Image (cartoon, rainbow, N blue to C red):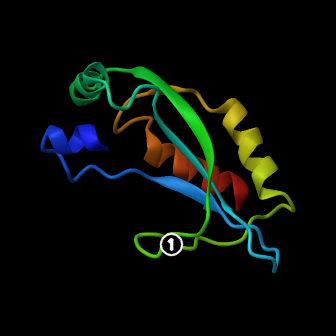
Amino acid sequence: MSMAYSLNISNLQHFMVLIKPSSPIRQEVLVFDFQPRNPESIEAAISLLSGNLIPGVVLQRRLKNVPRQRCWMVGPSKGNDAMEMAMEFNKSWETDLRVGFHDCRHYTNGLVLYKL
């Protein structure tokens, strides 16, 4: 995202899916998202702005807590193991990225629909 700020297009938003285990024991939150393979490169920024396809990557990482701002609860997962369902979805996700047509927003919507 820092590339977006340096190009003065700060209204771009990044979407991701957070999976919070339902265990009463406090656990880390799993984050799944889709972004350019090299998000900080000038080549990626130029390709994205011109509407070209660029290599993307599906990422999985952990957060200590659910963010307090700009984060919405969508609903519980239809299966018992939401993390496994997300990993299954990721195996079928095409990783060529094109802003507005196949980007983090489409990934997030697809993953949420797959899990709910």
Residue 23 position (above or below residue 35): below
The residue depicted at 38 percent of the width and 29 percent of the height is: 98
Residue 92 position (above or below residue 26): above
Q: Count all numbered tags in the image, as a single digit.
A: 1
Badge 1 density bin: few <14, some 14–19, many ≥20, Cα 10 Å? few
Q: Badge 1 is on which residue? A: 72
Which residue type does callout 1 highlight? Trp
In the rendered view of the protein, which quadrant contains the C terminus? bottom right
Residue furthest to the bottom in view is 24
The residue depicted at 59 percent of the width and 70 percent of the height is: 74
In the rendered view of the protein, which quadrant contains the N terminus? top left
* Residue 82, quarter of the rendered image: bottom right
* Residue 89, quarter of the rendered image: top right
Nearest the viewer among 103 and 11 is 11
Nearest the viewer among 28 and 47 is 28
Coordinates of residue 48 in the picture (x, y in percent): 29, 28
Q: Is residue 6 left or right of residue 3?
A: left
Residue 10 position (above or below residue 73): above
